[in-house]
Amino acid sequence: MATLGLIEYADATPEVRAVYDDIMATRQTDYINNFWKALAHDPVTLRRTWESIRQIMSPGALDPLTKEMIYVAVSVTNQCGYCIASHTASARKAGMTEEMFGELMAVVGMANETNRLASGWQVDIDERFRQ
Amino acid sequence: MATLGLIEYADATPEVRAVYDDIMATRQTDYINNFWKALAHDPVTLRRTWESIRQIMSPGALDPLTKEMIYVAVSVTNQCGYCIASHTASARKAGMTEEMFGELMAVVGMANETNRLASGWQVDIDERFRQ
Amino acid sequence: MATLGLIEYADATPEVRAVYDDIMATRQTDYINNFWKALAHDPVTLRRTWESIRQIMSPGALDPLTKEMIYVAVSVTNQCGYCIASHTASARKAGMTEEMFGELMAVVGMANETNRLASGWQVDIDERFRQ
Amino acid sequence: MATLGLIEYADATPEVRAVYDDIMATRQTDYINNFWKALAHDPVTLRRTWESIRQIMSPGALDPLTKEMIYVAVSVTNQCGYCIASHTASARKAGMTEEMFGELMAVVGMANETNRLASGWQVDIDERFRQ
Amino acid sequence: MATLGLIEYADATPEVRAVYDDIMATRQTDYINNFWKALAHDPVTLRRTWESIRQIMSPGALDPLTKEMIYVAVSVTNQCGYCIASHTASARKAGMTEEMFGELMAVVGMANETNRLASGWQVDIDERFRQ
Amino acid sequence: MATLGLIEYADATPEVRAVYDDIMATRQTDYINNFWKALAHDPVTLRRTWESIRQIMSPGALDPLTKEMIYVAVSVTNQCGYCIASHTASARKAGMTEEMFGELMAVVGMANETNRLASGWQVDIDERFRQ
């Protein structure tokens, strides 16, 4: 199921349970997904990763749905099966319709194509785009 | 400047000029960036790529700014220097503030991190995320 | 099981058996893993790849455990499922503890994150880091 | 120099200066590299990234040199120019000799090769490597 | 089977059926593979992607077999399981022998290795290779 | 110019010169490109890499031009600036016309796009494509 197995709530140390509790409270769910149960073997990384995600994914200048779609865009580009499945689910829960999903995939596909056309044709950066 | 050089408007065939004209009209600008001038050596690819981009990037279920930020997210993940420079400029032109840019980068960075944590810890996809 | 199937020892040509024998002798095992059995359809690549790996992974300025962990770091970054599974097993056999694995993953994750922050923020290389 | 420019110490807010001070104290240097000066436009990301790196890169089950070499391995695999330059410098400062660097590159190159051979030949994971 | 499921011919709209019909006529087959059945949820992307592929993969200055092998090379480098499986099948149908497949994989593996050696050793582009 | 600098023929050890001589004889040129001059700091890797490339890139079931174009396809997908520049030059020397280059780039771009569409839409591999 994972390199070192999954740690269920019942078997978790108080340190790990505290993170699980915060995940469930923040996400208003009673479900902890496998990613966290796998990371729980390394409580320091579990805590740091969760706190970073909670901070980054909370509403700010960008709304949560936009952030989830960006997460999907990166995961698809990297071809991470787990992340595509879990963040597509999160994005749909946050309001992504089928039409939005279709457009998201179209942009991701096109960007991956033109990234290679730009590099392959060895195009220099325009003066006006330079920092 | 590019593998086969850049083709300026004055030196372009009518076929290429027609694409340049459509780019300038659609984007309401008199500037053609290097990407198109390089691709112009292959008029078939120039036309197909431009028409795909025009179709994909026009407003739909997702607004143009969101699409540009997704484009940046993919380009950064792939580390395409040209595309990062040009699409960051486009996103700013479309309304991306410095605060939005900061949050975009934070999500892109975090997604790239957790993509590897999920794969490295060999986490199985949760039953509820499976299609 | 693999594009052209797996070639077992009993069915192998003398040329392939010689490589299998060397793998088993070098690794002090009687097990040949699927990677080699798949490559065996192309004996030239089988031999060259094995000889390169034997040369590269033997003790030198870096010890075998460090080399295996670097192998895992690359495989995780590329998200190669087969390589993550097999080299994580090799690294553990070479002495990687669960704590070391956790730290390895943390570094790999962080590096993947900051690689994108550096590119996305278009940071120029400091004069002192240039060659 | 960077998307939003670089923020020098003299121009930094107290919040940013506090991070700069901690970087200089931790690394026993008076030099802040461009990466941090670029990120300083987003003080929240600056602080979170620095604190994560300080935690992850400090000595633990793996020594700092091993961690820096893993950082280089990931950066080379992702082809991040900035990160290759800065972390190669850090690894050398931490004690990486030219011979160690050569072996590091050899392992990184080989892993990138066999990652594709394993995927390209569509090799199934051996039962014994499965979790 | 796919994020939004697969759409069979019998359940498809006339718009989608028209694309399916063209795929079957062009490829002289009565089989539509899963990729198209998944994309069919987004008819605009289905049509644009199919028309682009039909245009790009038809015989030109490069023959169809060479194009299929290039497709495999990219898919293996990106480690896209679906694309490796489907385009390896297409390449074999177009005439790729086992020996050609072996050489293709050898080149792909080596290129992935030297791509990282060139970047990792921070090699400057030779004057004569610059555009 | 490179992490440890470039080693010119005049300054090379007999071991390195032997490789340089073989490169020049095999390629019928008096030019050694920077890649080899950088690697020369690690003579073992220099020799192994050169011998692997000489073996892999020589005519076989695939002709040298096809191999060079596959090399370019991988390098563009990985966005390795050095390798794109040097192998595009090699491919042109081996006979790649501008038209062939345009088609090569079109296939590479499209493959990078559909790789992500297949992964993003989470398409299962068709039974008939499975090994």
Image (cartoon, coloured by chain):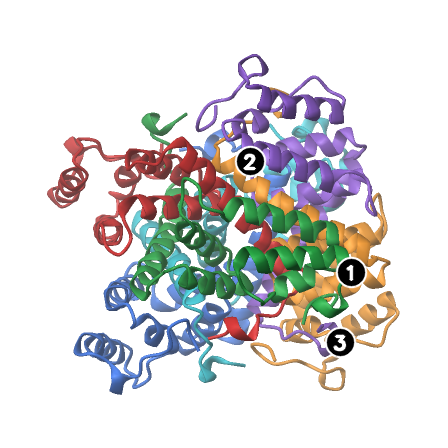
Chain colours: A blue, B cyan, C green, D red, E orange, F purple
**Left or right of D78, for residue E48:** right
**Side of A20 where E97 appears, left or right:** right
Report the side of D10 relative to F33 (left or right): left
Q: Is residue A109 visible?
A: no
Q: Is E30 left or right of E82, judged from the image as shown? A: right
Q: Residue at x 23, y 55 (%)?
A: D60
- Identify which residue, C71 or F114, lies in the foreground: C71
Amino acid type shown at disc 2: Thr
Assign a secondary structure to mark 1. Answer: loop
Quarter of the picture holding the N terminus of chain C: bottom right
The subunit carrying tag 1 is C
Q: CA distance from mark 1 to mark 2?
A: 30 Å
| SS for dot 2 | helix
Q: Residues within 10 Å of mark 2 (few under 14, many from 20)?
A: many
Residue C28 screen position, x and y as percent: 53, 61
Tell me: residue F34, above or below residue D35: above
Q: Quadrant of the C terminus of chain C?
A: top left
Amino acid carrying label 1: it is Thr
User: Of the numbered discs in the image, which one, if any, rests on residue F45?
Assistant: 2
Q: Is residue F86 visible?
A: yes
Quarter of the figure with residue F16 = top right
Protein chain holding label 2: F
Q: Which residue is mark 1?
A: C13
Same subunit under labels 2 and 3? yes
User: Is A11 situated above or below C45?
Assistant: below
Reading the image, the residue beneath label 3 is F128
* Quadrant assignment, res D92: top left
Q: Nearer the viewer, residue B25 or F7?
A: F7
Q: Residues within 10 Å of mark 3 (few under 14, many from 20)?
A: few
